[in-house]
Amino acid sequence: MSAISAKDWTEFVRDRRLLLTAVLVTLLGIAAVATSFARVSAYETDRRATEARDRTTWEGQGARNPHSAAHFSNWALRPLTPLALLDPGVTPYAGSAVWMEAHNQNPPRARAVEDLSGAFDLGAFSAAWILQTLMPLLIFVIGAGAVARERERGTLRLMLASGLGARRLVPGKAAALGWIAALLVVPVIVVALAAAVLAGPADPLRLLLWSGAYALFFAIVAVIAVVVSAASRTASQAMLALIGLWLIAVVLVPRAGAGLAAATIPAPTPDAFWSAMIAEIDKQPDPFDSETFGAAMAKRYGVATVEDLPVSLAGLQLDESERVGNVVFDSSYGALADTYGRQRALLRWTGLVSPIAPLQNISMALAGTDMSSQLNFQRQAEALRRQTISALNGDMTAHGKGKDFDYQAGTDLWKTIPAFRYRPPSLGAALVSVIPDILILAVWSGLAGLLLAASGYWLQRGER
Amino acid sequence: MLALITLEVRLLIRERMAGILLAITIAACALAFVNGRVLLGQQLAGRAASAAEDAKTDSAFREKLGKPTKIEDAILYPLRVKLPLAAPLPPLVDFTAGRAAFENYSTTITLRSRVDTLFRRTQLDNPEMTMRGAFDLGFVVIVVAPLLLIGLGYGLFAADRDSGAARLMLAQAGTPLRLLVVRSVPRLALVLTPILLTALALLAAGPAIVGRETAALAWLAISAILLLFWWSVVLLINSLRVTAETAALALVGAWALATLVLPPLIAAIAHIAYPPPSRFDEIATARAVEVASTTAYENDHADLASEDVAGRLASARKTYAIGRSVGAATAPVSEAFDAQLARQQRVSRTLTWASPSLVAAEALAAVAGTDGPTWLGFRQATAAYLADVKGRLGGFIERGAIMTGADYAALPRFAWQPRPERAGTALLILLLLTLGIGGIAVARFRHVRLD
């Protein structure tokens, strides 16, 4: 088998067309890593500067009514982990800034995709894009002639007649192609990992698992290439079949799956979503209009009338209004997250047709740029929003008796409000979220092994 | 000639590859049709919801204005005005989704609205689905169809040369040109026909919008020229003395470069050359100005601030003044943003000529009304409308005047229409490229040597 590998390597190096293409794609991959590094670094510098500036604004706002400050509030800005430069995932399409104001749970804003200049979007130029889109095509093109060219030249029968046996020839060809693929892919992955480490503290285990997922994927790709080559009469036939497979598996299936998921399980339109939420809130008893609420508070504090309350009634009303709103927000956003989850579950089925979908999910999860991480960011922002508004309303309640909206708090209060600090999901949580995808990729690996074995058997029979 | 074409069609039907490619074309077109219809349905439903909300809000507010009200409440009417608006439906959003898949097309204008927060309630589509991209008819034309043409044509003449049957084929056809025509027509028809039928089906099933048929004609012309361009490349490669395998490799390489590599590379270059100003900076600047605009921060519940007219009017004036200060401070940031985006678009447009696929893709989006400049135009028109409405509503507050039903009816309504795009330059460039490359290929075939 090492002789087969050496022979195939020599042929690959002598084929200038393939060598040039391979070098160009590898250089493109390195360029993608460089641009991603610049993008992520610039983003993080910008985010940190904005957070510092905004914190100064918040703490320096002077004496104000706490509820007014609750309307002004703070922003949660999503940080990008160093691994985001490996795979930007959903981050260009999901907002990275949440306004944590009173009375509203806002969706995230500032989506990078809105600032793109063009209308034709085939994905963000990144290491993941090169590895998921271009590299499989390149490996298919290189591997198309692995067995088919031997058949065309008439050397296949000679090789089989030499005692090699098809059941060793086919795995040998797959191993040879695997080595060639590794030599193309490894520089891109190494540069990507180095860039991730330079960009900030990166978990080495995540980096290892990320590389491992891609290694498994390319092994599957190499096997498929050799199996198709072994089944084809000519190298050009094999190439076209493989390019067709690439088109279907890498380009068409993910898009078709996403379109199907979005069509069969549609997300609500913004107007419908906000109208329904407002209508639901309007149905709830309004603590500002209700004498019942005042009476309930008087009873809670053990006084006869609301005028005897030891605290600010306005503060209590604001707090109750927030509580009522939060119940509606939980229901509405929960239903939206549930819709997203069902769409994802449907999209997962495309993994049975193409290994690219599970690879994409695993890659994004390990890079911390998948939908789970995004929703995690939004949940943490919402949790801080509620904590902040509650603290501000609570201060007004405790100290605003007799003054209500004329009561003013100062810097001491503003400084007690914590700044947003994002806690990314743990590696364990990330892996748990993609267990189905890991299993699907494992099934693909098993299938590739079976195909490899069967291919050798069919080749032996076919050449008798 | 017709007999030869018929014979060629029969041979093609017998080829397994042609059958597979036809099946892929039909499946892709069917999926594009379904997705196009779904997107169109969503866009129509969204606009209908916006219009219904507009009607409901309008009716409720007119009713309120018609009833006798305490002056303490009436003084706050300008703060209560809500004017929902939506961008007109792009004429061919079901053909090419473009930016429609993720751009906001509706918002509500109030006195408190700001240019930088007009579209803060973003689309709620799942980013995980949006990330995977739209599968529309434009995608089929730009990405899928050229590859299918390459699959049908890589060995158009190269395979005959490899097998030694080239002399026989030329003798049968009479002239090289006849051979090219005989072989080209059925293959082009195999790919173009499903696309044409799908386009007609979308047109028939879609809404009756002014300009939709004209836009569809332009869209089909661009698509046809692009596919003819790729066929001219197929002919050129086949005119070279290369094997079928080399021809396939060269054609796939050219397609990958023009369609897969150059578009994101050009976008990345434009982004690096003119990086967009920071959205975070825009947020922080607005907030700093808002805080600096008042030493005693204005209460957002004007009706809770005071019970009397003077108090409420003072509160409303404060809100309006703060809004104007913030608007004035953030206007340069928003303008810088739009200017930088426009510069990015200019760089992108310049570099776009390196990739015929990108030229065609942007032209299809322009004709469909889903391209970048159209959405930028919508945002700019919305900003201008906002300034107009705020000026009028603010006038009531500054004068301390009570808004009447007639005043409300006199408020302008958003009525912006994008400039129809015919993409003439793109058509011309693609046509010239096609004729140039095709001409070279034909010239080479006229003098083909088989020794």
Image: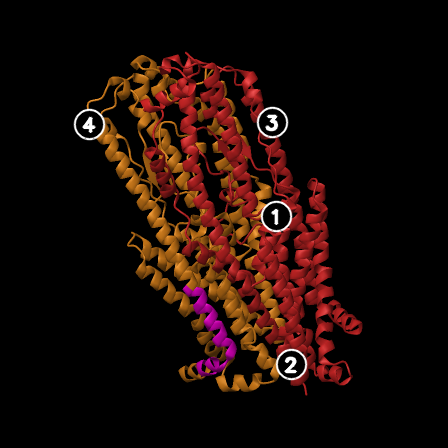
* Residue at the image position 49 percent from the left and 84 percent from the top: B173
Can residue A360 be seen from the camera position used here? Answer: yes
Give the chain of mark 4.
Answer: B
Gap between marks 4 and 2 measured at Cα = 86 Å
Q: Are marks 3 and 1 on the same chain?
A: yes
The amino acid type, in three-letter code, at marker 1 is Ala
Gap between marks 3 and 2 measured at Cα = 66 Å
Q: Which residue is mark 4?
A: B66
Q: Which residue is mark 2?
A: A458
Q: Are marks 1 and 2 on the same chain?
A: yes
Q: Nearer the viewer, residue B329 or A242?
A: A242
Q: Which residue is mark 1?
A: A430
Q: Which portion, as a residue range, is magenta?
A: B9-30
Kindly state the secondary structure of the residue where label 2 is placed. Answer: helix
Mark 1 or mark 2, which has the lower sequence index? 1
Say which chain is red: A
Q: Nearer the viewer, residue B174 or B298?
A: B298
Q: Kindly report which numbered mark, 1 or 4, lies closer to the viewer in this rendering.
A: 1
Magenta stretch: dominant secondary structure:
helix
Gap between marks 1 and 4 measured at Cα = 58 Å
Can residue A125 be seen from the camera position used here? Answer: no
The amino acid type, in three-letter code, at marker 4 is Gly
Q: Which residue is mark 3?
A: A52
Gap between marks 3 and 4 measured at Cα = 50 Å
Q: Is residue A358 magenta?
A: no
Judged left or right of residue B269, residue A178 is right
